Image (cartoon, helix red, strand yellow):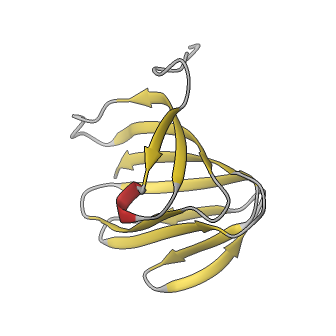
Amino acid sequence: MLLKPLTPSPAKVTDCHAGKGVLWCQELLGDYAKTAGGIKFIHDNRLEPGASIGEHRHDQDEELYVILSGRGTMRIDGTEQPVGPGDMCLTRVGHSHDLVNRGGEPMHFLVICANP
């Protein structure tokens, strides 16, 4: 099955989850009303240098971040780790996370959100 982006160009998101700065988000797949198990959405994101996605908790779904380029820090449940190309960060149900771009270029990553 061939998937085409739901949004033809990235949307500008400011201060995502009470973070700071600009996130560019292109929605590749979206089924936000989904309650059964499986993928709810896939986003292709670029986080500007110095920008962040604020800490937020996942009470009913899980998210997998796949870092494609750029460098930053991901914090899951208060534990901070450096992240870069090839890293994957999984936040399970009942846990929280945030992301900060600490590099000098946009951080490019995919976000895959699913119901367990």
Vertical order, 92 against 25 (above or below)? below
As drawn, the residue found furthest toward the bottom would be 79
Which residue is rendered at x = 71% and y = 51% of the image? 106
Q: Nearer the viewer, residue 69 or 22?
A: 22
Percent from the top left, x then y, of residue 54?
42, 67
Q: How many marks?
A: 0
Percent from the top left, x then y, of residue 91?
45, 65
| Residue 33 in which image quadrant | top left
Vertical order, 3 against 54 (above or below)? above
| Residue 102 in which image quadrant | bottom right
Q: Nearer the viewer, residue 31 or 23?
A: 23
Viewed as shown, does residue 2 lie left or right of 27? right
Q: Nearer the viewer, residue 96 or 36?
A: 96
Which residue is rendered at x = 71% and y = 62% of the image? 87
Which residue is rendered at x = 78% and y = 61% of the image? 104
Vertical order, 13 against 9 (above or below)? below
Percent from the top left, x then y, of residue 7?
47, 22
Quarter of the rendering occupied by the N terminus: top right
Viewed as shown, does residue 14 lie left or right of 101? left
Viewed as shown, does residue 22 lie left or right of 83? left
